[in-house]
Image (cartoon, rainbow, N blue to C red):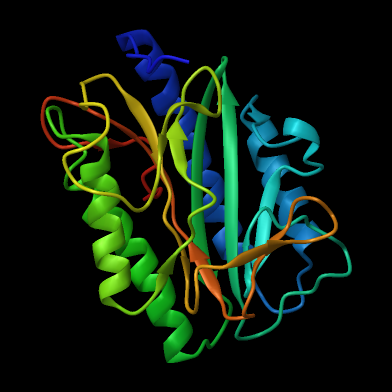
């Protein structure tokens, strides 16, 4: 699939999809407390998304059974919500979600600490989030795609953490996953040249220990192989003739 350049109308639809997703993430963060189940989080997320007349991007996507991916502690991505999976004080919880508004997707992820978390967990969350912003310094017209990838990798590894290799960012638009694939590692100066009107989902997935991962028997949940914790941060962005626009910027 070729990389698509979005029209002004498509960009407006994606802005609205992004705004609604940012509100959803904001409300889910408020609801995250010890004692809540991961299924409670999923149900709340779906309720918020549908209250805006939108559809959850993830529900039934390739058979995924929920609207929100809820990944706890050593779960990297694609955690399936369950009524018996109860969130505890000190956990870190990654929430990945998407919204379809009038046929266009937004995609964003956040990792949150629940109550008092350890300094090590806080650092992992903060480095993962900042690596996204280090990457999008190069998300400008004229740069190469892997300039973003290399900046994320350099920042993460400079803090002693590992980049997950098997899962990557992607284009986003009329499809949730469009070209190009966007690794969180690579060599600068490579990949397609960035052009205004491209819409990309940049999403560092960072392990506190080794980069090795394993998929669980449910066919979705991915955990670190060494049992150390992981964090995830993602936004959908628009390439412009200046600074990138974060379509899923946190709601004020």
Is 20 in front, or is 208? 208
Residue at (58, 32) in percent of width and height: 99
- Please give left or right for residue 35 compared with residue 84 in the image: left
Give x and y (percent) for residue 139. 21, 38
Total number of numbered discs in the rendering: 0
Asked whether residue 23 appears in the rendered view, the answer is: yes
Give x and y (percent) for residue 23. 50, 45
Is 30 in front, or is 122? 122
* Quarter-of-image position of residue 66: top right
Asked whether residue 60 appears in the rendered view, the answer is: no
Q: Report the residue that reaches farthest toward the right.
A: 84
Q: Is residue 140 above or below residue 233?
A: above
- Please give left or right for residue 55 compared with residue 101 in the image: right
Give x and y (percent) for residue 100. 59, 25
Residue at (76, 63) in percent of width and height: 38
- Please give left or right for residue 120 compared with residue 226 in the image: left
Residue at (68, 48) in percent of width and height: 68
- Please give left or right for residue 252 compared with residue 207 in the image: left
Give x and y (percent) for residue 112. 52, 69
Residue at (60, 68) in percent of width and height: 93
* Quarter-of-image position of residue 161: bottom left
Q: Is residue 51 above or below residue 24?
A: above
């Amino acid at each position: 699939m070729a990389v698509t350049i979005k029209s002004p109308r498509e960009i407006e639809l994606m802005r609205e999809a992004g705004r609604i997703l940012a509100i959803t993430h904001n409300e889910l963060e408020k609801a995250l407390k010890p004692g809540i189940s991961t299924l409670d989080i999923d149900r709340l997320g779906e309720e918020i998304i549908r209250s805006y007349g939108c559809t959850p991007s993830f529900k039934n996507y390739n058979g995924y059974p929920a609207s929100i991916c809820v990944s706890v502690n050593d779960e990297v991505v694609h955690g399936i919500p369950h009524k018996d999976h109860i969130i505890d004080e000190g956990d870190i919880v990654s929430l990945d979600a998407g919204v379809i508004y009038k046929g266009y997707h937004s995609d964003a992820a956040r990792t949150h600490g629940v109550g008092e978390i350890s300094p090590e967990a806080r650092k992992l969350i903060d480095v993962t989030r900042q690596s996204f912003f280090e990457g999008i310094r190069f998300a400008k017209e004229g740069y190469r795609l892997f300039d973003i990838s290399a900046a994320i990798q350099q920042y993460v590894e400079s803090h002693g953490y590992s980049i997950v290799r098997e899962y990557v960012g992607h284009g986003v638009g009329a499809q949730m996953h469009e070209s190009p694939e966007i690794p969180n590692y690579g060599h600068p100066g490579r990949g397609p040249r960035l052009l205004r009107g491209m819409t990309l989902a940049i999403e560092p997935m960072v392990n506190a220990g080794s980069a090795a991962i394993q998929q669980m028997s449910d066919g979705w949940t991915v955990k670190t192989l060494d049992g150390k914790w992981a964090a995830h941060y993602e936004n959908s962005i628009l390439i412009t003739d200046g600074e990138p626009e974060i379509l899923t910027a946190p709601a004020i």
